[in-house]
Structures are given as structure tokens and as C-alpha cells.
Image (cartoon, rainbow, N blue to C red):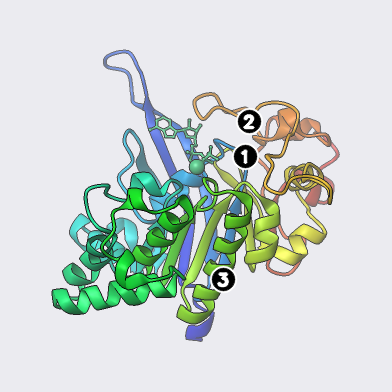
Amino acid sequence: MNAAATPLLEVEDLVVGYRLPAPRGAAARHARVLDGVTLELQAGCSLGVVGESGSGKSTLAAALARLPQSGLSILGGRIRFDGLSLLELSEARMRALRGSKIATILQDPLHSLNPLLTVGTQIAETPMVHERISRMQAWARARDLLAAVRIANPAARVHEHPHQLSGGMRQRVAGAIALACAPRLLIADEPTTALDPTVQVQYLQLLQELQREHGFALILITHDLSVVARVCDQVAVMYGGRVVEAGPTAAVLREPAHPYTQALLASLPTATGVAGALPVIPGQPPEPSAPPGGCAFHPRCPRVMPRCRSERPPDTVPGPGRTSACWLGVPGAQEP
Ligand SMILES: Nc1ncnc2c1ncn2[C@@H]1O[C@H](COP(=O)(O)OP(=O)(O)OP(=O)(O)O)[C@@H](O)[C@H]1O
Ligand SMILES: [Mg+2]
């Protein structure tokens, strides 16, 4: 087998849900927040995950790292990472993996950083626990990492607390913590949403530079297709807890196959608009507790056909390395 062709991460039919209230004695039923997500990522590559609010992006990020999510449970599917079957690992082994090969940067650095500890302590903690290096070595690493995320005067900043830093610096510190153990996969969930536009651009450039220098694979979750266009080799478009379209970013954005991707692109701000604005597509995204039958996008789809209301579309292949879950790609599907 050609090892280079084996993806670093393979997600197959991942289902995550929460339990719906049911009368006593009735069988348990679950609402599916992720409803059969399938995707893959090669080592060192970058995947952008886009979709409207509520489409399941953060749930996917948390499920991939098996972060505890209150009320949500993984109901099925497989996650293979670097030869390991993640859903079969014990919590202890998973914790070790989270401190070494899989790192996460979450949306709001104020919540992910501890306000009581200096940034140096927070960066040094992970390598001290997982690599058993000395405190002095770990602090030297913390200073190096602050420099790596382009924080000026790291020897002084390493002794400061999160409230002494700007929002952009705090997000850089979150990046330094994520890099502390040289991860193979970095999952960044809307890492720039809390930052102002100029700082957003700088942070994304930094992420790209770090990826080139450190060679990790990146999953970048964002509302903003223009960010994906700039940063990511691959894109996965989520709708209603599923990946409705995926493939090489350039090909998908040049010629989107799925009507939802087409709508997202059509709602992108024009050259005179504000980058990062939320796309506006008429209608509401589905509720996981009451998903529409057939294709989840059918109530909002401008090209809906009778079959879309009752039958879930299969994954079709609109081009090399691409998928689109839409009946439009199935020859003869127009006939009822
Ligand atoms: N613990 C929970 N219990 C019930 N429903 C939940 C829970 N967590 C998330 N959900 C639901 O799951 C769906 C997906 O949520 P998720 O946070 O993954 O979306 P998202 O794509 O990250 O949205 P955003 O862009 O707003 O961050 C939403 O409908 C949300 O209400
Ligand atoms: Mg989210």
C-alpha cells in the first residue's frame, strides 16, 4: 500500500446527537446534530469547513478531538487518525493524543485561556505533562513559541496574564498553546471571529506560515468562503449536519455543484462589500429535532424536484476528488 496516499484523517458516517424527551418506557430517540459526516484529510493539507450557523461545524470539531460536549453523544461512525481508531480509544489515551498529535484552537480565546495563570505557564503545561521535559526547558519552549506566533518581546510577555494582552495577542497565545507539542492535526474553530478585520487577515497569514513551517494538517472552520479560498486546499460545505459538497477548493468555488454551495457563493459580498459578512439565503436552516425529509436543503432549494422531498440524495461525483450530495447530479433523477 502506498503510505503517502493514506489520509491522516478519515471520517466515515459520523453521527452525533442528543436525546429527545420521551414518555417513560418509550424507546430513546435522538436528534442528529451530525447526520452521517464523511470526509478525509491528507497529512500537511488544509481543509476548510463552511456552513451557516447551526450546521454542525463546532460539533464536528469537538467530535474529532472527542472533546466532551454537554448533552451530545457520538452515536455512530468511524474516525481514523494516523492509524488509530479514535472512537475506540480510552479517554486516557485520547487525552494524551489531544496533548500531542491533535490540537484545537477555539472561537473565543478568553474562554480557552485561564485568566489566573501567566501565558508562559499555560504554554509550558502541555509539553511538561506530555513530554516530561523540565520546567526550564518548557519555559524556554514557551518563549520560542510566543516568538513563533510573532508576539514581540516574548521574554516579558511570557510572564503576563491573558487580560494584559489584546484580543489578537490572546488568539496568538492560543495558537502557541496548540503548537506546543508539534501537532499533526490542528483544528481551528472560527479562530478569527472575535478579531477585527485587519487582525483577522494577519492571523490567517500567521496560520498559513505556521502550517508551512511546522507541516501540520489544518481544519479551519469558518463562516467565510473567502477565507477558505485564501487558506485551504480542500473545502467541505456543511448543511443540516451533513457534508453536502466537498473537494479541492479552487474547483468547488469555480464551479459549485450543490445548490447550497451555489447560494453561499452568490451571497458572498462583492468587491465593494465587507469581507466576512454572513451569507443571507432565504429561509431557515433545519432544526436537528425536526429535520425535513429527503434532502435537508429542499425547503430552501431553488432547484427542488419532487424526489428531493422524499429521498435523501446520494453522493455524486461532479469532478476529480469531488462529491456533491444532490439529485441534480444523478442522471434521470428529474423523472419522478
Ligand atoms: N448540547 C446540545 N444539545 C442540543 N442541541 C445542541 C447541543 N449542541 C449543539 N446543538 C445543536 O446542534 C446544531 C449544531 O450546532 P453547532 O454549534 O455545531 O453549529 P455551528 O455550525 O458550529 O454553528 P455556529 O456557526 O453558530 O458556530 C445546532 O442546531 C445546535 O442548536
Ligand atoms: Mg460553531
Return the residue nearer the eye: 202 or 111: 202
**Which residue of the protein is positioned furthest toward the bottom in this rendering?**
2
Q: How far apart are marks 1 and 2 (CA)?
A: 8 Å
Q: What kind of residue is marked 3?
A: Gln
At label 3, counting other C-alpha atoms closer than 10 Å, the crowd grade (few under 14, some 14-19, many 20 or more) is some
Q: What kind of residue is marked 2?
A: Pro
Task: Determine whether the beta carbon of the residue marked 1 sits less than 8 angstroms from the nearest atom of ligand 1.
Answer: yes
The answer to which image quadrant residue 49 occupies is bottom right
Task: Determine whether the beta carbon of the residue marked 2 sits less than 8 angstroms from the nearest atom of ligand 1.
Answer: yes
Mark 2 vs mark 3: in front:
3
Q: Which mark is residue 208?
A: 3
* Residue shown at 85% from the left, 40% from the top: 334
At label 2, counting other C-alpha atoms closer than 10 Å, the crowd grade (few under 14, some 14-19, many 20 or more) is some
Return the residue nearer the eye: 177 or 287: 177
Asked whether disc 1 touches disc 2, contact meaning CB atoms under 8 Å apart, the reply is yes
The answer to whether residue 186 is visible is: yes
For disc 2, the marked residue is 285
* Residue shown at 38% from the left, 66% from the top: 176
For disc 1, the marked residue is 52
The answer to whether residue 330 is visible is: no
State the SS at label 1. Answer: loop
Q: In this view, does 304 lie to the left or right of 43?
A: right
Q: Distance between the residues labelled 2 and 3?
A: 31 Å
* Residue shown at 59% from the left, 58% from the top: 48
State the SS at label 3. Answer: helix
Compared with 20, 246 (above or below) is below
Q: What kind of residue is marked 1?
A: Glu
